[in-house]
Image (cartoon, coloured by chain):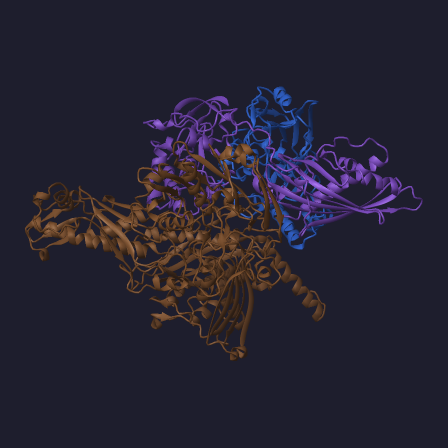
Chain colours: A purple, B brown, C blue
Amino acid sequence: MKPIRLSVNGRDIEVEVEPRQHLADFVREELLLTGTHLGCEHGVCGACTVLIDGAPARACIAFPVALDGAAITTVEGLADDPVAARLREAFMAEHGLQCGFCTPGMLIMARDIVLRRPGADDAAIRHELAGNLCRCTGYIGIIRAVRAVAAERAKAGEAAVVTRSGAVAPPLHISPLTLPVAPARLPDGQDARPGRSEDKPAAGAGFVPEPLRNPVELVQDFEVPASRAQVWALFQDPAQVIACLPGARLTAPSDGRRVNAEMLVKLGPIQAAFGGTGVIAADPANWTGTIEGGGVDRRSATRVQARLVYGLDELPGAAATRVRVEVAYVLQGPLAQMSRGALARDLAARLTAAFATNLTALLRGETAPAQPAPLDAGSLLFSLVKDWLRRLFRRA
Amino acid sequence: MVAQGQDGERSGGAKAHKGVGASVRRKEDARLLAGRGRFIGDMRFPGQLEAAFLRSSLAHARIKAVHIPAHLEGRAFVHADMAGVKDILAKTGLPGFRVSAQPSLASGKVRFVGEPVVMVLAENRALAEDLCEEIEVEYEELPANVDMLRAAKDGAALIHEDWAENVFLVSSTEKNFDETLKGAPIQVTREVRTSRQCMAPLEGKGCIALFDRTVEQLTLWTSTQMPHIVRSGLAECLGLDTRKIRVVAPDVGGGFGWKGLLQPEEVCCAWASLRLDRPVKWLEDRREHLIAAANCREHHYVMTAYADTEGRLLGLEAQAHVDAGAYSVYPFSACLEGAQVVSNLPGPYNLPAYRCRTYSVCSNKPPIVPYRGVARTGVCTAMELMIDAVARAAGLEPYEVRQRNLVRPDQMPFTSITGKDFDMGDYPESLRRAFAMIDHQGVRARQQAAEADGRRIGLGYAVYCEQGAHGTSVYHGWGIPMVPGIESCGARLTPDGTLEVRIGSQSHGQSMETTLAQVACEVLGIDPELVNVVHGDTAMTPYSTGTWGSRSAVMAGGAVASACERLAGRIARIGAHLLQAPLEAVTVRDAQVIGPQGSVSFREVAATWYLAPQNLPADIDPDGLDLVAGYRPTVDTGTFSYAAHACVVAVAPETGEVEILDYVIVEDGGVLLNPMVVDGQIYGGTAQGIGTALYEEMIYDGHGQPLASTLADYLLPGAGEMPDVCIAHMETPSPNTRFGQKGIGEGGAIAPPAAIGNAINDALAGLGAEMTVSPMTPRRVRDAVEAARQKASAESRSVGGFAS
Amino acid sequence: MKAARFDYLRPVDCAGAIAALEDASARPMAGGQSLGPMLNLRLSRPGCVVDISRLPELRRVEERPDGILYGAGLTHAEFEDGAVADPTPGFLARIAHGIAYRAVRNRGTIGGSLAHADPAADWPTTLAALGARVHLAGPAGTRELPVEAFILGAFETALAPGEIIAGIFVPRRSARARFGYRKSCRKVGEFAEAMCAVLVDPEGDVQRLAIGATEARQLVIAEAGTAINSPEVVDDILRAAGLAADPATFRLRREVVRQAIAALATKSQPEGQPA
């Protein structure tokens, strides 16, 4: 908990906040100012729009801990604001609301528009309202209401107002609801996460790989400067194989047939840790083998299944070996629910390439990548989510 | 005692006309504009726990194990913990319907991504989500049925393993269809597809369950469109007497159908509140909604239209698939949509011959729920794209082909080829007016010249009729858990002479608090400001199936009128006594009882009844000023509002961008209770239709993973995407309803994909491109243009190889 | 969803911020318009959020003879409103006006946008076309890079661990300079499927063209005279950059580039912008 001071609707408050609590939850849950609505919590829909130091902002992606000293105005704080009053009247006259859920955010945005742009025409109003979604009205009544008030202000000769860093007069009667109430959450420490229970079966005890359905598949060939027997021996040592995968490590010693491993993936601001189990099968007669495994990023419940088939061919002279690796995988769960799919191949290719590089280094006798760093930005899952990221964050 | 010559204000009468037909300002607005609405998320109770659901990350899998750490005992619950709770069953009486049992928490297997598996309770949502991360579910994956055409085929992995195939129901009809049609001069075949959508009300669903010891009732506050239906369903699942349950809908932030069902999460919260004796709350967040509730609009059609050279339809043959998702939803079932496809596909046209077969397919996606317009948005898109295709094949104006096939006013009332009883109206006239308003000739002239910016202009029409306020005769044959019958209203004159009307349907943006007060005003002359419309609470309102199917203006409106009329009779008797006039000599008007020599206000009538009974005659009717009355229309097969939509678009073939330049709607909702509100419903519906036409689509990958989890991936139309729609009204009264009103709530959402699609195809016709998949995104437009170009260049090569 | 737990620090100066960011689990946050949603979706789980929005160095506007050095913490709205001086004839305000929505522009920062390196965002492509340079501060001191060298790929930058963007230097352009900008978005304020920015300044013979919204870093042509004058050259450039594989997408990109070039002549304002 961190202490902060805020002015909310003209009342100064001192309060301790949990850093992760966003401003909309703070005013709704701690101050009972429930006029600020949550429509998405991703900064897209605009229902939670409030004024921070006079300027509209998304309360769902603003955090009070970072707003120390700021003045917040919610829809309740505009009770006596003359511009908001005029807009309320216009919204009623033009049927600018139906269910009313988007309305507080819409009203706050509308007020900002008529202040900044008196006389704004329909095209300008549509552009300015684009970040506030309404599912009921089709916007027509809202646009008419904003246009009417914007035109009135222009006609009255009102100058454009800079709302950034502007002050907003508090309501005449400060609502008792702006008093902080006892937080509903547990105090710090009481909810510290204990370790996992013992009832969970030992990881991988009964692991049977499932067949992969519609996997993404790719193949990579590379040569390594070592004899086939040397390479084969390496492939039979799970610890060494795992060490060649960026970000991966064994979580328990392997019996040579089963591996319990963990793989960290860090992609820009996203982190995932896939823990899982694999089964190794070797066919020495044909110099081929298979590693099949499945893992879960427990926090996001994203599941990955993968299969690696390798085959070794002796090159002329017996001093070098061609390694053929076929990788197939399926990713499902929240980390998969955001991409357009096709880009996953690219990242798996990078992973396979890194594997080849590390394996070659190891066979050359260079230092094995003891604790290889997870592939950072521009690697692994990163590509998978980049389309999605673009959709979400093109605005930054 | 007798006040004479009081003005309207003192008597409570409405001075200006505020009854039926007046654009009265909404009574709901003041609280909502002040941020003083009370939505489900705004409520909380001491000791409340909040739920987070750990949901399936796979589309189809067996649950091998759920690992819950010991310290979550009493906070995390799985299906086995809910012993005694019954699965949600939405059966139908239709022959061949396969019943799916929907467990409130997944049992044994999961059937779609987002299906709840574990309920976790904590002091707030963030903590509950923290705890969810400590739980692990082990799955054995099964093949996911993502494409409904393949899911319906033999060999697909069975979603419900006791079924023979992944099909809930096959619906079909055939009339006058014979092989002679195959000789028709014009035969056009098309494959049309509409994509899966989310309804996306701005407020998600949510509920709070609490056992109210004072009345020994489990009370569920829930964001619903149908509190009485939720009550019945909940009683069934929990094995409680219905009297032990009260369901209350507070302010509801939009529904559109998504809040017209019994939700598994509602059952879970109710159960948990009984088990723990604590208030339990769940709020659906946007991610949950997008992942677990993309549940509507996914249709596929293969259609052949037969016509003569004049463009007159001779017959229509269709095979349709509706992706109904994993379960049959309570109360509408998994087959409402498919059955509506069969019966509504011919639309407002006089079709001589028809054959249609529809498969309601079970898939590994969220269960289908009727969304505003229900199947009609899909069938209108399919049928209207066909009409334009026929027109192109016949070399005729699409406008003209429509005029030649629409049911004419002289044929009304008309029974359609699927047995729909069209009540009244002039369909061709609505189209004629749209033709004039969109400036058809002007647009055609403009198309002759190339646009300076290289874009192509297109003009499109769509006509539909919308059955609303379906009654018993429409629904009883389906055998679903809900059959609408007589709608009731409670009316009570309070001791100060103001009025409460209590209805069992629910208003969540439809403005019923205003329009039903206007109905009371129309009957009693009381100012709507002095009328409270109480709705959404089973403890305070008579039974109703709720708000769905464009029914409330007709049904609740009729019920309020009936109750007010009955109340007027009782008021009149007391008033006549006070006026010392014979009952036949008094009338009720302007919130007064008016006699030959004076009048008495409602206030005085009420004061006498409640506060001064000594002034009543000994033989007064003891039933008093509080009553319940019922209503149903004279014909209960539903009202048929209709509309013609016309639009002009500009399409940029290179970028695929589509701009709507003009959009007009000529609609007939009969008598409008409040024209401002009706326009608002049409605008809002149209915006959703534009979303369907151009923006909204939940894409699934081959494993059934939904690929949008924020509103930045799933695009809803914003102010910048909504054109300035122009509406004209025709107002042909329905002969069957109390005021001649018709249901209009859904219509706006029905026609836009068809009108816009036709306009885009009109624009692209010169390039040889035609689109039949919605939404018509820039990507799809570009691909269609590219495909047409490649086809053209292949053809020119094959004819002689000279470049154009 | 609600954010997972994180700690919060607000260092008082750049050095403090850099030190705090040496913890690998720490993430910098300025306007929070990108990080906020990621936190709420629990996709980003920093141990600590380091608030750099109030660092004095990130709020400066330093006029130099050849341009202006902006602190990275200036908001899109401050550019849109002309609250900070502009070394171009109004280009920065114009671009800022088209970024997302006003409520986002009030909090989102120019530095945050560059650090996020979304290929479809407005600033990276615009600033690359304007020839801007990124000033970085980190444990190893300060350095500067041209925008096109700073952005390595989609969401990939040259930022080293612990390093932050301190400022952005935008070169001065003459009053006769023209800027053509076009993006193709599915809806207002949403991400672009294709975008292009063109700068022509007759004084100094500057002709730069940047193509954004590719799957990778911006394609920047520093000597774009031929491309601007002959559309076929643009086609070749797109082909050479591997952006022509899909014919329909190729046509989109080509059209957007042509329209951006055409916009040089029309001086068109973005939608909704007062003339």
Q: Residue A14, located in which quarter of the rendered image?
A: top left
Horizontal arrangement in the rendering, residue A85 relative to residue B575 (left or right): right
The residue shown at (38%, 66%) is B427
Horizontal arrangement in the rendering, residue A373 relative to residue B484 (left or right): right
Q: Is residue C232 visible?
A: yes
Q: Nearer the viewer, residue B763 or A136?
A: A136
Horizontal arrangement in the rendering, residue B387 relative to residue A308 (left or right): left
Q: Nearer the viewer, residue B77 or B529?
A: B77
Q: How many marks?
A: 0
Q: Position of residue A323 (x, y in %)?
A: 83, 45
Q: Residue A36, located in which quarter of the rendered image?
A: top left
Q: Position of residue B519 (x, y in %)?
A: 26, 52
Horizontal arrangement in the rendering, residue B2 relative to residue A349 (left or right): left
The residue lying furthest to the right in this view is A317
Q: Nearer the viewer, residue A339 or C198?
A: A339
Q: Is residue B653 visible?
A: no
Q: In the image, is residue B673 above or below residue B130?
A: below
Q: Residue A318, located in which quarter of the rendered image?
A: top right
Q: Position of residue B418 (x, y in %)?
A: 42, 69
Q: Position of residue B303 (x, y in %)?
A: 53, 68
**Where does the C terminus of chain A fall, quadrant-wise?**
top right
